[in-house]
Every structure is written in structure tokens, then in C-alpha cells.
């Protein structure tokens, strides 16, 4: 025996379907218009004043941010790019591009990252693949683009670079050793320090 749904049942199913579609649409709109601050690692972060912070990291733990390991930097043309330059895997170094020149942030020290580079994907990245924080879109080329005219990124802060058990090549942190803050880069072999 075939039971026919009542008119009321059909109307309720249609109403529920429309409500689901409306909720999905509202969720997408809310997410796409969200320009909130991003904190990785915990809900507190390391910045005491949050008004000018777009992205920051946990205020606990001994971790750093790892820059992309690049074996061909000739296609990188965006000022502000920072990479672990592994073009010569036995002489890798952390570098910064200002728009015309690459600057060595490893203080002339190089590292053999052959073993590290072996675990990196062989395929080239998709040229249009990127994550944008602070805006819905960005014309800037890069893997991670922070798009804001008024906010910045706060790097991970550690009390000593020696507390990082297994630093990875391309890692960068702020070392806050008793009030003296130092920007530190690890090239896979040695740390380089930049005081400010």
C-alpha cells in the first residue's frame, strides 16, 4: 500500500529545505565579510595591544613560523617576500626581497638542507594558490598574504632560541631575552640574529 504524504508534510519539507539554504547563505556571507584578527595556537596571543594586529601567534610554547622553502626564486617579484632560499641546497639561507634586491637574513651563514628539501613536495605550487587574511581578495602574489593598511603580523615570541627543540630550516621568531628583543632566523644549520 502506497502512502501519500499530506499537503502539510510537503509544505514543511519545502520550508525546512528553504531554511537550510537560507542558513547556508547567511553563513557564507558572515564568513566572507569577516576581517577579524587571527591568533594561531591559543586565544590570547602575544600582543598586549590588539588594535593594530592582523595576525599573531600563541604566547606560550617554543615554536616559530616556518618560511617557504624555495628552490627557484626567479618568479618571486613581490616586495616583502621572505623565503628559505634552497636554490643551492648545500648553501641555503633565509632571504628577504625588497622589490629590487634579495637581502641575506642569515648573516652570510649557509646551511645544507638537502635532507629537509627531500621531504618537500616535488611539484611546483599552483601560481594562484594563496591565503589572504585581512581582506576577501588581494592582487598581491604570495602563499600567505596579509592585506591591511593599518594592521600588522606579530611573530611568535620565545624567551630563548635554545628552547626550540627541533627548529626547522626557514624558521623565524622573536627572542625576548629579558627585555632585549631580537629577530631570529634559522637557516637549517645556524641561527642569525637581528636586534632592533
Image (spheres, rainbow, N blue to C red):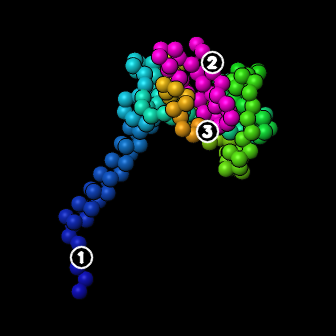
Mark 3 vs mark 1: which is more N-terminal? 1
* Foreground: disc 3 or disc 1: 3
**Residue closer to the observer: 45 or 181:** 181
Q: Position of residue 147 (x, y in %)?
A: 54, 26
Question: N-terminal of the two: label 2 or label 3?
Answer: 3
Q: Identify which residue is drawn at 71% across, 38% down.
A: 70
Q: Which mark is residue 4?
A: 1
**The quadrant where residue 182 appears:** top right
Q: Is the C terminus in the top left, top right, bottom left or bottom right quadrant?
A: top right
Residue located at (50% from left, 19% from top):
177
Distance between the alpha carbons at the discs numbered 2 and 3: 18 Å
Residue 19 in the image: state x and y as whole percent. 30, 51
Quarter residue 39 falls in: top left
The residue under label 3 is 168
Q: Measuring 68% from the left and 35% from the top, which residue is drawn there?
A: 189
Quarter occupied by residue 144: top right
Chain part drawn in magenta? 168-196
Label 1 crowd (10 A; few <14 / some 14-19 / many >=20): few
Q: Quadrant of the N terminus?
A: bottom left
Residue 38 is labelled as none
Judge whether 179 appears above or below 28 on screen. Answer: above
Looking at marks 2 and 1 on the same chain, the residue that comes earlier in the sequence is marked by: 1
State the SS at label 3: loop
Residue 141 visible (yes or no): no
Q: Is residue 62 left or right of residue 145?
A: left
Q: Nearer the viewer, residue 85 or 111?
A: 111
The reply to whether callout 2 and callout 1 are in contact (CB within 8 Å) is no
Estimate the spatial distance between the alpha carbons at disc 3 and disc 1, rounded to whole Å: 65 Å
Dominant SS in magenta: strand
> Mark 2 highlights which residue?
194
Measured from the top left, where is residue 37 in percent x and y?
43, 28
Amino acid at each position: 500500500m502506497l502512502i501519500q504524504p499530506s499537503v502539510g508534510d510537503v509544505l514543511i519539507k519545502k520550508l525546512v529545505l528553504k531554511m537550510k539554504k537560507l542558513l547556508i547563505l547567511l553563513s557564507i556571507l558572515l564568513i566572507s565579510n569577516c576581517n577579524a584578527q587571527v591568533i594561531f595556537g591559543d586565544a590570547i596571543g602575544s600582543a598586549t595591544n590588539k588594535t593594530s594586529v592582523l595576525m599573531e601567534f600563541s604566547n606560550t610554547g617554543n615554536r616559530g613560523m616556518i618560511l617557504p622553502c624555495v628552490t627557484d626564486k626567479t618568479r618571486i617579484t613581490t616586495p616583502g617576500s621572505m623565503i628559505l632560499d634552497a636554490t643551492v641546497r648545500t648553501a641555503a639561507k633565509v632571504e628577504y626581497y625588497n622589490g629590487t634586491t634579495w637581502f641575506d637574513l642569515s648573516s652570510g651563514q649557509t646551511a645544507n638542507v638537502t635532507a629537509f628539501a627531500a621531504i618537500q613536495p616535488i611539484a611546483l605550487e599552483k601560481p594562484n594558490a594563496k591565503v589572504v587574511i585581512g581582506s576577501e581578495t588581494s592582487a598581491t602574489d604570495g602563499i600567505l598574504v596579509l592585506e591591511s593598511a593599518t594592521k600588522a603580523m606579530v611573530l611568535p615570541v620565545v624567551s630563548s632560541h635554545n628552547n626550540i627543540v627541533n627548529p626547522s630550516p626557514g624558521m623565524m621568531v622573536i627572542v625576548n631575552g629579558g627585555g632585549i628583543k631580537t629577530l631570529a632566523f634559522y637557516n637549517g644549520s645556524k641561527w642569525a640574529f637581528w636586534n632592533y
